[in-house]
């Protein structure tokens, strides 16, 4: 067994320096949805990697640049690490305890927009690399980084970038952008991500808003028109009514169900954490709830816009209405299929005037739980976290892992510094400093062990 005393000592003694680097990175806004600070952040990330001896380049895309960096190691094996440098919008600002782009440390945590999703994962990995270079003078294996700037807006251009640059991204295994512990502080190994098809539905019934007293009885109302169209998408029992929507769905295997059954109950924790009073249906047991939360495709109205929503009243008949809707997809559904099904459904229901704008997405993808790299990552987790990772067959969220699993044909694993109270995408986003160290410990052990295989 390798003695990591010197590595861990370096991590501890250089923690403050690493956290300061993280705070500097988070102080630089990089909101993809608002095109705020994207090129500046990409350049900053490039410089951070070059400071570690990586050969780094900015690659143009039709959207935000992709950062690719590589450094040769002792072994010929190559580990690809995927992160993203873009973050969610910080609004509403008034719900933050401290300003979102002025990172603040308090109560053993650091707060700031993007600090958990995903900049803290990135810098904790850099800290692990710093420790390995300090102790061994070289990396145990080749390491490549790929950082994109559009993950929070659906990774619109990344799949094409990966397809075109397969030789540049050639590797033997991949570490994904996130990971962490559950509500018990047990590290979790998420073996896949659901897919997503994100759309904007819109309708226009007039060239301008109209006085509701004039048009309310005789003019079409865009808000009602869209509301009625949305109402056709699924039944009260949550059955999605798009033609053929469930035809491609692959149900969970017995192994999937077994892995979920071995995980701790989550129902009561969800009820408590999110202030719920019920779920969408009465589940017979917690395993049934877990199965639905991962292996059941969804149709979610994410936002509605029409007419007047300011203080007081404004008697207006809206001319335009729009809604953001996401479909979370399971194997083997694809966004292309869903877009076609959605168009057919709206036309059949009498809503050919409702326009569909595709905002991004991709299919679901999974890694074999029995892959040797999964075993390596799980085995090295025990010493780093104090507990052994538990396997989760898939997680309900989405990301561009399909390009890495299917196009690059890589096993993709998760590990990191996340925890349920991290408030990713919400005000007071934060990381725990103790998990920051544990995440760096795990990355250092993964890289070292991978170099020995």
Image (spheres, rainbow, N blue to C red):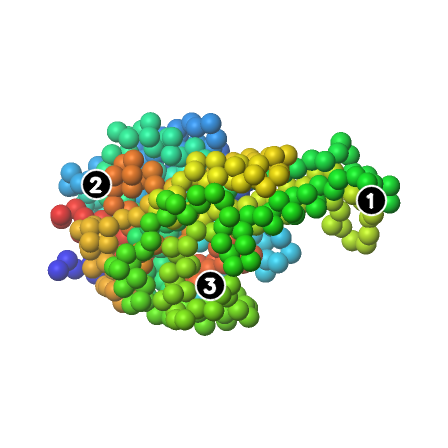
Give the quarter of the image for residue 48: top left
Q: Label 2 to label 3, Cα distance in Å? A: 33 Å
Q: Which residue is mark 2?
A: 172
On the question of residue 417 being in view, the answer is no
Q: Label 2 to label 1, Cα distance in Å? A: 65 Å
Say which residue appears at 39% left-offset and 56% top-offset: 294
Q: Which residue is mark 1?
A: 217
Give coordinates of residue 230: x percent, y percent: 60, 47
Q: Which mark is residue 421?
A: 3
On the rendered structure, is 443 left or right of 266? Answer: left
Q: Nearer the viewer, residue 238 or 190?
A: 238
On the question of residue 61 being in view, the answer is yes
Please report contact status of discs 2 and 3: CB closer than 8 Å, yes or no: no
Give coordinates of residue 226: x percent, y percent: 65, 44
Say which residue appears at 70% left-offset and 38% top-offset: 320
Q: Is the residue marked by circle 3 packed among few (<14), some (14-19), or many (20+) residues within 10 Å?
A: some
Helix, strand or loop at disc 3?
Answer: loop
On the rendered structure, is 62 left or right of 452? Answer: right
Q: Compared to 72, does 413 lie above or below?
A: below
């Amino acid at each position: 067994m390798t003695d990591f005393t010197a590595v861990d000592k370096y991590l501890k003694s250089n923690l403050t320096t690493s956290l300061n680097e993280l705070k500097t990175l988070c102080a630089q806004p990089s909101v993809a949805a608002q095109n705020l600070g994207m090129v500046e952040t990409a350049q900053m990330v490039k410089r951070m990697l070059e400071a570690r001896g990586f050969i780094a380049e900015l690659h143009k895309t039709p959207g935000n640049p992709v950062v690719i960096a590589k450094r040769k190691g002792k072994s010929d094996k190559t580990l690809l690490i995927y992160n993203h440098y873009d973050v969610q919008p910080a609004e509403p600002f008034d719900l933050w305890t401290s300003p979102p782009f002025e990172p603040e440390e308090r109560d053993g945590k650091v707060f700031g927009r993007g600090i958990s999703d995903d900049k803290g994962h990135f810098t904790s990995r850099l800290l692990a690399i710093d420790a390995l270079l300090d102790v061994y003078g070289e990396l145990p294996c080749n390491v490549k980084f790929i950082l994109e700037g559009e993950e929070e807006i659906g990774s619109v251009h990344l799949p094409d970038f990966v397809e075109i640059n397969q030789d540049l991204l050639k590797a033997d295994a991949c570490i994904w952008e996130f990971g962490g512990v559950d509500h018990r502080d047990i590290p979790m190994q998420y073996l896949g991500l659901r897919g997503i098809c994100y759309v904007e539905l819109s309708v226009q019934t007039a060239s301008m808003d109209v006085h509701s007293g004039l048009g309310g009885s005789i003019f079409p109302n865009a808000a009602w028109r869209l509301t009625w169209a949305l109402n056709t998408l699924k039944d009260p029992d949550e059955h999605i009514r798009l033609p053929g929507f469930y035809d491609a769905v692959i149900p969970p295997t017995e192994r999937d169900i077994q892995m979920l059954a071995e995980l701790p109950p989550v129902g009561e924790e969800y009820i408590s954490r999110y202030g719920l009073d019920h779920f969408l249906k009465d589940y017979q047991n917690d395993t049934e709830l877990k199965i639905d939360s991962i292996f059941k495709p969804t149709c979610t109205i994410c936002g509605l816009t029409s007419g007047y929503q300011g203080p007081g009243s404004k008697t207006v008949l809206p001319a335009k209405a729009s809604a953001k809707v996401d479909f979370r997809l399971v194997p083997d559904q694809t966004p292309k299929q869903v877009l076609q099904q959605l168009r057919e459904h709206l036309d059949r229901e009498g809503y050919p005037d409702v326009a569909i704008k595709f905002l991004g997405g991709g299919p679901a993808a999974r890694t074999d739980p029995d892959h040797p790299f999964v075993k390596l990552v799980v085995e090295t987790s025990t010493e780093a976290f104090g507990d052994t990772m538990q396997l989760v067959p898939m997680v309900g969220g989405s990301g561009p892992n399909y390009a890495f699993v299917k196009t690059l044909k890589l096993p993709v694993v998760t590990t990191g510094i996340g925890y349920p109270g991290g408030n990713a995408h919400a005000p007071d986003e934060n990381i725990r400093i103790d998990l920051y160290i544990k995440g760096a410990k795990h990355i250092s052990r993964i890289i070292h062990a991978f170099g020995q295989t």
